[in-house]
């Protein structure tokens, strides 16, 4: 797996990887991460096509998902204590 691009964003780290004819878009925020896999053949324009896919609306939904993930994790951790 090799990193092919990073997209700067103030709320999370966004990395794009290439492996076995797939793009992996990885979002990281603290200890949480979300990954999305796409076949390279499904994206027109290679990495530039991935940049087009990752628009502000998509990123906003990812950020909201991070909030929900964090709540779920904190709830589980509090039950653990």
Image: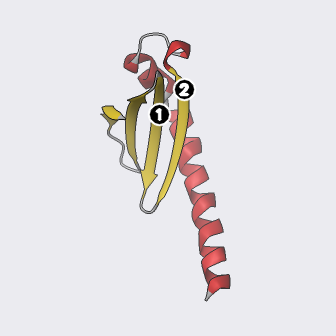
Q: Residue at x 37, y 39 (%)?
A: 15
> Total of numbered circles in the picture?
2
Q: Outermost residue toward the top?
A: 44
Which of the two residues, 31 or 55, is positioned nearer the viewer here? 31
Q: Is residue 46 left or right of residue 8?
A: right
Q: Which residue is mark 2?
A: 38
Q: Outermost residue toward the bottom?
A: 81
Q: Is residue 19 left or right of residue 39?
A: left
Which of the two residues, 21 or 49, is positioned nearer the viewer here? 21
Q: Residue at x 41, y 51 (%)?
A: 11
Q: Residue at x 53, y 49 (%)?
A: 63
Report the quarter where the N terminus lies: top left
Looking at the picture, how far across and down is residue 69, in whole percent? 60, 60
Q: Residue at x 65, y 67 (%)?
A: 72
Which of the two residues, 12 or 5, is positioned nearer the viewer here? 5
Q: Is residue 46 above or below residue 64?
A: above
Q: Is residue 51 above or below residue 1?
A: above
Which of the two residues, 41 or 66, is positioned nearer the viewer here? 41
Looking at the picture, how far across and down is residue 24, in whole percent? 47, 33
Sequence-earlier tag: 1 or 2: 1
Disc 1 from disc 2: Cα separation: 6 Å
- Are the two marked residues, 1 and 2, in contact with CB atoms closer than 8 angstroms? yes
Looking at the picture, how far across and down is residue 26, in whole percent? 45, 42
Secondary structure at badge 2 equals: strand
Report the quarter where the C terminus lies: bottom right
Q: Which residue is mark 1?
A: 24
How packed mark 1 is, by other alpha carbons closer than 10 Å (few <14, some 14-19, many 20 or more), is: many
Looking at the picture, how far across and down is residue 52, in whole percent? 46, 21
Q: Quadrant of residue 3?
A: top left
Secondary structure at badge 1 equals: strand
Q: Outermost residue toward the front?
A: 20
């Amino acid at each position: 797996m090799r990193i092919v691009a990073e997209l700067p964003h103030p709320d999370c780290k966004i990395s794009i990887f290439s492996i076995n004819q797939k793009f992996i878009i990885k979002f990281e925020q603290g200890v949480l991460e979300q990954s999305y896999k796409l076949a390279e053949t499904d994206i027109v324009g290679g990495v530039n096509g991935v940049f087009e896919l990752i628009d502000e609306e998509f990123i906003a939904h990812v950020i909201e998902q991070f909030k929900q993930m964090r709540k779920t994790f904190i709830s589980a951790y509090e039950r653990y204590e």
